[in-house]
Image (spheres, rainbow, N blue to C red):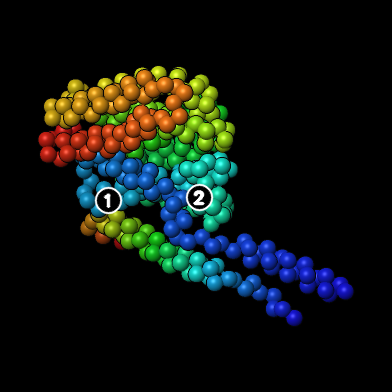
Amino acid sequence: MKPETVEMSEQQKRARKSRNIAIGIALALFVIILYVGTWAKFGANLFNRSL
Amino acid sequence: MAYVENTTAMNADFEERLEGISVAMPRDFLVLLKPRVMSLVIFTALVGMVMAPVHLGMAISAIAIVCIAIGAGASGALNMWYDADIDAVMSRTSTRPIPGGRVSPSEALAFGIVLACFSVATLGLLTNWLAGGLLAFTIFFYAIVYTMWLKRWTPQNIVIGGAAGAFPPVIGWAAMTGTVSMEAIVLFAIIFLWTPPHFWALALFKAADYGKASVPMMPNVHGNRSTQIQIFAYSLLLAVSGVAPWFLGFSSLGYGVIAILLGAEFIREAWLVLRMDAADTKMIPAKRLFGYSIFYLFALFLALLLDALFAGGAA
């Protein structure tokens, strides 16, 4: 009996891997943008808060 | 027997699911962003930011440019999602990712919405909400007002829709200053008045394509002659608006001279289009005007940029 799975073609596997890498890079860039942007906007004031 | 039928049905289901698995590569998603339009957006937004009297520093400015570019890209993706049927029948657009079968419509829609939300939120949080709001409005205007409504309804589609392309320098200005003032409005007016002669020049020599796709462009609805006259009229207005930064006093005489020369050449090219035989099939003057219009906008904004950087224009 054929297993109940979907066998992807080589092209589909290659495309999925490329998309995964691109999404990873995009997420990393987004984190960097927010980190750098927050520092640039608030600077040392980030620590200037009541505890 | 029932087992065989079940298995066959299950295999057909798997086949369908297998075909549904995307073969889209990252570059296909990049194409959805309309990179050439994005480059113009980046450039015009940068000019708006540099001309502004207030600057927020390199990091925030760079992030603002990225957000504006991604927002523009998002509206491009939403445009390609909605217009896939039109794109499929036009020679210029038939190889785009959706009609080419590389990206599914739902992938393009999700991609566009996610990028639009993140770009607007990031710009709003890191600069101000006027800039974020203007970016959101621009995406809405391009994807909903222009793409879904105007484009298939009226030959004035690109005249009104041109506002979407004219907003980036205003957003750049707003990101820096938190306001919109006369300088930003003049930059808006230049791109707004540039759009009709630019796109109608294209529509003249691509009229058959637009006709095939049932897009009511000016030459298809009111004929070539009417389009040629309107191109010339808008070119006159454009040439005057191009000089406006100088005579309104926020650019130098040097910029004024360049704008006058560029505008005079634009009017000359538009005059050649006006004199073109309406039955001309080669449409060389229209093709020349289309090419020159791209150069004109780039050169004019480059002059504004250099003027702001080195001659003390605007800021």
Residue B110, relative to residue B232: is it above or below?
Answer: below
Task: Say which chain tag 1 marks.
Answer: B
Q: Nearer the viewer, mark 1 or mark 2?
A: 2
Q: State the residue in front, A17 or B36.
A: B36
Q: State the residue in front, B165 or B99.
A: B99
Percent from the top left, x then y, of residue B74? 45, 47
Which kind of residue does numbered mark 1 sit on? Ala
Residue B315, relative to residue B270: is it above or below?
Answer: below
- Secondary structure of the residue carrying tag 1 is helix
* The N terminus of chain A lies in quadrant: bottom right
CA gap, disc 1 to disc 2? Answer: 32 Å
Percent from the top left, x then y, of residue A15? 50, 66
Choose top left, top right, bottom left or bottom right for residue A48.
bottom left
Of the numbered discs in the image, which one, if any, rests on residue A1? none
Extreme residue in the bottom direction: A1
Give the labeled residue for mark 2.
Answer: B95
Task: Identify which residue is drawn at 26% across, 48% down.
Answer: B61
Q: First in sequence: mark 1 or mark 2?
A: 1
Q: Along the horizontal axis of the image, is B113 left or right of B71? A: right
Q: Along the horizontal axis of the image, is A17 left or right of A46? A: right
Which kind of residue does numbered mark 2 sit on? Thr
Task: Identify which residue is drawn at 34% across, 39% down.
Answer: B168
Task: Identify which residue is drawn at 50% across, 50% down.
Answer: B95
Q: Is residue B168 visible?
A: yes
Extreme residue in the right direction: B1
Task: Say which chain tag 2 marks.
Answer: B
- Secondary structure of the residue carrying tag 2 is loop
Task: Identify which residue is drawn at 23% across, 56% down.
Answer: A43
Q: Is residue B51 visible?
A: no
Give the labeled residue for mark 1.
Answer: B62
Residue B185, relative to residue B14: is it above or below?
Answer: above
